Amino acid sequence: MATPTAARQTVNFITGNANKLVEVKAILEPAIQVENQALDLLEIQGTLEEVTIDKCRRAADLTQGPVLVEDTCLCFNALNGLPGPYIKWFMKSIGHYGLNKLLAAYEDKSAKAVCTFAYSPGPGHEPILFQGITDGEIVPPRGPGNFGWDPIFEYEGQTYAEMDKAEKNKISHRYRALEKLQAWFAKEMTS
């Protein structure tokens, strides 16, 4: 007699960023199936956690179902965590070289890459947060410039942009957060 297999968990990842979608799928699948929906969500100002929770609630309300959202920070230690959750806007306005110039007056070039995912089973449910952090250094851009600030964030001698994608997906802030999400889903499936 065959043992029934558990149904595979599916998440509706809300993002319009194709690079993020590729990374999330590479990390989660096949254990968790990733579907995608691009929604234009208003982002409030606040801490990374506040921004992510609000975005998750909005997405759950718009889709009327379960959602997974993500917010990423790049926190410069010399600047007390800035640009933080506003890195997307800093990148658009001053780019890689401008971000380096922000640290020109400081000896401390250390930074934290922080990724926070929020999952909600649907409208009216409190989002659950999963956060991953990778410590690194801010360096002049190296490697392909096709994914955000990857060319200026160095971890153990290589920028994210210089790393093989599979290698990056084993150490990144996004991986560390998704590892927690996977553990939570595994626990939920056995409860």
Image: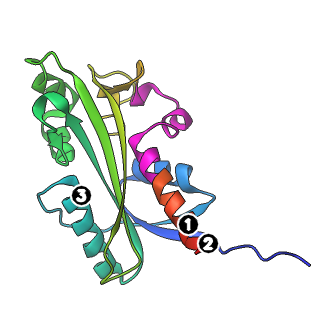
Circle nearer the N terminus (2, 3): 3
Q: Nearer the viewer, residue 151 or 186?
A: 186
Read off the residue under disc 2: 190
Residue furthest to the left in view is 105
Marks 2 and 3 sit apart, C-alpha to C-alpha, by 28 Å
The amino acid sitting under disc 2 is: Thr
Q: Nearer the viewer, residue 67 or 189?
A: 189
Q: x%, y% of residue 112?
A: 28, 35
Q: Is residue 12 above or below residue 62?
A: above
Span colored in magenta: 159-178
Q: Is residue 42 above or below residue 24?
A: below
Residue density around tag 1, few if under 14, some if 14–19, many if 20 or more, within 10 Å: few
Q: Are marks 2 and 3 in contact (CB under 8 Å)?
A: no
Q: x%, y% of residue 2?
A: 87, 76
Read off the residue under disc 1: 187
The image quarter in which residue 71 lies = bottom left
Quadrant (top left/top right/bottom left/bottom right) for the N terminus: bottom right
